[in-house]
Amino acid sequence: MAETTDTYTARESVYDVLLVGNPNTGKTSVFNSLTGLRQKTGNYSGVTVEKKTGIVTGPDGGTLRLHDMPGMYSLIPKSLDDSIAREVLIGEADEDLDIRLIVVVADASNLNRNLYLVTQLIDLGIPVAVAMNMMDNAASSGVHIDLDALSEQLQVPIVPVVASRQQGIDELRRMMFDQVGPVDRDARTDGSTETAGEAVSFAERFPRRRLLGGLLDEALAPAAAWFEEHTNLNEVAQTSEALRVTSSDQALQTWMEGRQDPSCKEDLKRIVEQTRGRLDELQVPWRMLETILRYDQIDDLYSRVVREDRDAQASLSVRLDRAFTHRIAGPVIVLAVFALVFQSIFSWAEAPMTLIEDGIAALGAFVYQFLPAGMLRDLLVDGVIAGVGAVLVFLPQILFLFFFLALLEDTGYMARVAFIMDRFMKSMGLSGHSVMPLLSSFACAIPGIMATRTIKNWKDRLITIMIAPLMSCSARLPVYILLIGAFFPSMTILGVFTLQGLMLFSMYFFGIVVAIGAALVFKRLFMKDAVPTSFVMELPPYRRPSLKWVLLQMYERAKVFVTEAGQIILAISVVLWFLASYPQPDDYDSMTSRSRIQQSYAGELGQLIEPAIEPLGFDWKVGIGLITSFVAREVLVSTMATIYNVEEADETSVDLRSSLRSEVDPETGDRVYTPLVAVSLMVFFALACQCMATVAIVKRETNGWKWPIVMVLYMTALAYVGSLVVYQGGLLLGYG
């Protein structure tokens, strides 16, 4: 994603604040609460790792630039996201930032684990403050924290917050401005400013304490001297990094990769090896030494500032997890939950769909009567309104899908789904790191593919990229809804589910099964030497969902669908209307509407590929849709709507579902579209790579065209064979 321009560009009078924290601590909620809508999204310089930046306005008019860093557990990078965050924090990144404060978002209900990153950041020598989030969850879990004592021990300010309810956000904002010092209250977001005040140093307010001493400092001195000579780190950070590279081969490798001078790299490697040898002589276990030392102090600190009521802590969450993460009951519950979700999508969305459908028909009729006959009227009614409106009809289902996904995520249940999938994927020899990117792909394959940056092993990451588009994304939903609603009755099954809801669920489940099979093929054919990597996943506590956050997620995703997808659909509808309406021969007025569109540019194109897709049960009209939908999957719906409106042009818009059901072959008198054809087409769309944007993002993430081409070829072949088997097999079984 390219850097977007905005009114709050870099300037000296606006100080930079970094927002850091472990995953699942509510960091994004804190960021959104502090910045509101004053945000922009871009990429870090030279890499495709997304960053968010927003403006925080102070109580007296000053402004701060807040940067939401990728979630991380420590300063030892495990992924590309971790590496970028670490480089920004230690000043090694190519970012022109005036960092005055690091705000660490910590989960109060999981404080012991969160303190590890907090202590590492304190040792960087940059002012640190802690936003202690989820205080309500901690209290309900029986965790009581003496925040004053903790603040005194760490010598950093701590503000309790519950970001999901906006509690403590104003106090956090005031604390941030207090810590960075006076910012010019006349600073404006248009780039102009008066003079900015000087910030009071953090060291003057909260003298730091060091975690190391004695013989250990002496042993680490040569490595610390190397960091003093070759970096801009302060004294405390030099010693901390010396400890880090001594304890971790990954940390050592990261620093060596960041140096251009070969002799500099070799010096660091030699010094570290000597340091490790010295520690062996002192009988100090240098492997994981930083972790041991920090947790010794953290455990001692935790015991003095935290009181736990273990009976309360182990009550509800433990009882729920016994069922939700059970080896047998867990997967059954997941299937039941998502079956209910898809059932609700059909049941609840019917009324708003009807309203939208009626509104679009009324709009088409109004424009038809208001404008004189001619090209403009035909374009607006048969092209724009029919094409765009046919997709907007399915907006309620998309909103309900996003609503349920956000709800499950906010309650903490999606993490349990990931845990269950991780266990299953490991049993199949796949990477557990792939779980969250694949789950993200249910909304859209693009962020799912981008999320694979958290996978350290390149081959595991590549497998995940190659199968992510097989997860049924929201762009496929209009196609599924159209075909299921047109050809399958709303009959009740088991007294709870309907056939339509189960059909929709089965398409999503089908994509998962095929993705697992494809992953196994890639693993065995191309990546036999790939070594399975360990995967640590945190299960957040169950939370009461925030309706505001859930609705915000719905709004943002609906906005993306309407604006970005809508623009594509509008453009394709206009082009397709022209292709379906022209050329107009001399005897155009005497021709039937079917003959007119068959002789149009679009009709000729569809008939050209019809012999290839006829074995799948598709006619030339579907062929046109298959071509146009490569731009975006949901364009199939607008394509079919445009074709039928051009073919049946009158003062009203065509009901696409009714048109598909009533379409008859003029030569045979048989129905053109049947339930079998609908299933065949859904299978094709479940498996085909009908998305140009996905291909582009794969090209960017794999740095070449090899794997995008492989993806398009294997998914197209898979879709063709799958659709062929379904249709021809159905005919053999007597379904027609």
Image (cartoon, grey):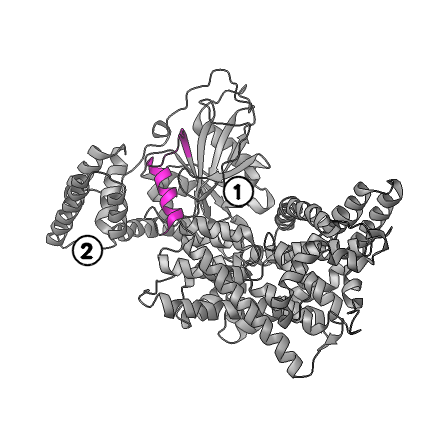
**In this picture, residue 337 sits left or right of residue 96:** right
Quadrant in the picture for the C terminus: bottom right
Q: Which mark is residue 285?
A: 2
Query: Secondary structure under badge 2?
Result: loop
**Crowd class of label 2 (few under 14; some 14 to 19; many from 20; radius 10 Å):** few
Q: Quadrant of residue 473?
A: bottom right
Q: Position of residue 40 (x, y in %)?
A: 54, 36
Asked if the magenta segment contains residue 406, the reply would be no
Relative vertical location of residue 250 with respect to residue 664 in this rendering, above or below:
above
Q: Quadrant of residue 633?
A: bottom right
Q: Which mark is residue 45?
A: none
Marks 1 and 2, how far apart at CA = 39 Å
Going by the numbered disc 2, the residue's amino acid type is Pro
In front here: 83 or 578?
578
In front here: 302 or 724?
724
Q: Position of residue 636 (x, y in %)?
A: 66, 57
Query: Secondary structure under badge 1?
Result: helix
Please name the residue shown 55% across and 30% down the image. Answer: 6
Q: Position of residue 453 (x, y in %)?
A: 42, 52
Q: Does residue 471 show up?
A: yes
Which residues are drawn in magenta?
79-101
**Crowd class of label 1 (few under 14; some 14 to 19; many from 20; radius 10 Å):** many
| Mark closest to the chain's N terminus, 1 or 2 | 1
Q: Which residue is mark 1?
A: 30
